[in-house]
Amino acid sequence: MAIYDPKSLKAEEFINNEEILATLEYAEQNKNNEELIDAILEKARPKKNGNSTVCAGLTHREASVLLACEIPEKIEKIYEIAEEIKLAFYGNRIVIFAPLYLSNYCVNGCVYCPYHLKNKHIARKKLTQEEVKAEVIALQDMGHKRLAIEAGEDPVNNPIEYIIECINTIYSVHHKNGDIRRVNVNIAATTVENYRKLKEAGIGTYILFQETYHKDSYLKLHPTGPKHDYNYHTEAMDRAMEGGIDDVGLGVLFGLELYKYEFAGLLMHAEHLEAVHGVGPHTISVPRIKKADDIDPTAFDNSISDEMFAKITACIRLAVPYTGIIISTRETEATRTKLLRLGVSQVSGGSRTSVGGYTQDERPHDTEQFDVSDQRTLDEVVAWLMENGHIPSFCTACYREGRTGDRFMALCKNGQIINCCHPNALMTLTEYLTDYASDRTKEIGFKMIEKEIEKVTSEKVKAIAKKNIEDIKNSNRRDFRF
């Protein structure tokens, strides 16, 4: 029997089944233990230490107790603290990105994904470099600055050389005032050498969803193909870190396995990265399984309600206070509105999950990876965020200034977000409003910028940001950043 060890590099030791089962039993025994719950909530609450905000975070056991808690007033307290943490470390900024699907060729047999090898209904497509350019121009014309590229696992059709070539192409496209300034990468687990190549190509975050941490379920859900190797997949982030990538993103596909098990495994993975590499996940994504070609989500009997989904998100925010939490267009506008308050800090907008979808007038369905629930345009998403009090941010400054990994976490923890990320968000929002927004969105946005710029506490930074904002509005000068 494997022994639980968060510092181990072996998957069965840092994601330890016996530890997860013991955690779930402990949480069940203490789910109505008010004294313990109050102590955990107090530990989670952000506290001021001079100019810095300190947040202890929670262990997987502590957070699992909160997730199991059934006391309504304590659940409301969880939500309240989640919002406090989000505002303390990220303010009211919401980072915006779009996925770009490069290829749906895949050799795996994942039973929940329409890309699986045996699916003969889906049209297989791989973008040429000219098609990549066309997609990027379409995304730039929408106003996007940050992409997450996606591809199935296929060593013949989608080798690492193809991914690198696509990244280089994306960064090379400069259309009107548009640039893609950060490319995050969501591809299959690979070697240290290949992660080093991705780092050299200038990627932002390397994202890999675990799908499920329950090993027996994982093996059944991935019956064939290289993804069947649970240990190789689960240990991928350590290889990525060894290859020099210090911003990594975790995630599970909620609905494949029992959510309490997944939640504990996800937090144990975050604890492992912190213990071994000194920095936790840059992002955590919270997708739920959705309908897609050849995939019926009702075949998976572990689906979760909207209310439990909100509680999971809030508890992740309490447990891993500094991470960016991502919610995609898998979710409806109503669900995304609620979760923004509970800790989400990144959203996709105007997304198309088909290969080559952005150059089509109508959203194509034949190559989609999942059905998009929130089908609003980017302009509509930007306006909606602002109407709900959030600043849409297209900022990529930290990545390009080398503030990644532990350097970003230090910035986040020392209270300098308001003098760095806040003005950067407002300047990139000004770019969007000036170059791409509808008249209505411009009206809402410029009023918000005028109000929000006054929150910058450094008078020097405020003065520079105000001048830059005016320069953006009145000239073709772009890409100011702190």
Image (cartoon, rainbow, N blue to C red):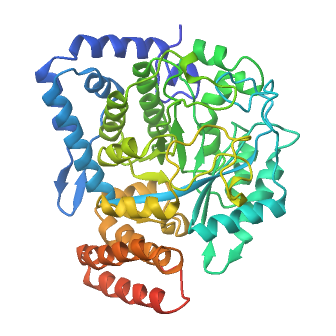
Where, by quadrant of the figure, is residue 410 drawn?
bottom left
**Viewer-proximal residue, 72 or 267?**
72
Rendering coords of residue 58 (x, y %): 30, 34
The residue sitting at the top extreme is 1
Residue sitting at x 33%, y 81%: 461
Residue sitting at x 53%, y 12%: 2
Horizontally, residue 162 falls left or right of residue 60, namely: right
Rendering coords of residue 412 (x, y %): 35, 58
Horizontally, residue 433 falls left or right of residue 239, namely: left
* Above/below status of 293 relative to 145: above
* Above/below status of 429 relative to 281: below
Rendering coords of residue 90 (x, y %): 33, 57
Rendering coords of residue 152 (x, y %): 74, 39
The residue sitting at the left extreme is 35
Where, by quadrant of the figure, is residue 113 drawn?
top right
Q: Is residue 432 visible?
A: yes
Count every numbered label the image shows and give the total: 0
Horizontally, residue 149 falls left or right of residue 307, namely: right
**Viewer-proximal residue, 179 or 249?**
179
* Above/below status of 252 relative to 183: above
Residue sitting at x 43%, y 34%: 271
**Which quarter of the rendered picture does the C terminus lie within?**
bottom left
Residue sitting at x 37%, y 59%: 385
Where, by quadrant of the figure, is residue 413 drawn?
bottom left
Horizontally, residue 398 falls left or right of residue 200, namely: left
Q: Is residue 482 visible?
A: no
The residue sitting at the right extreme is 156
* Above/below status of 372 relative to 70: below
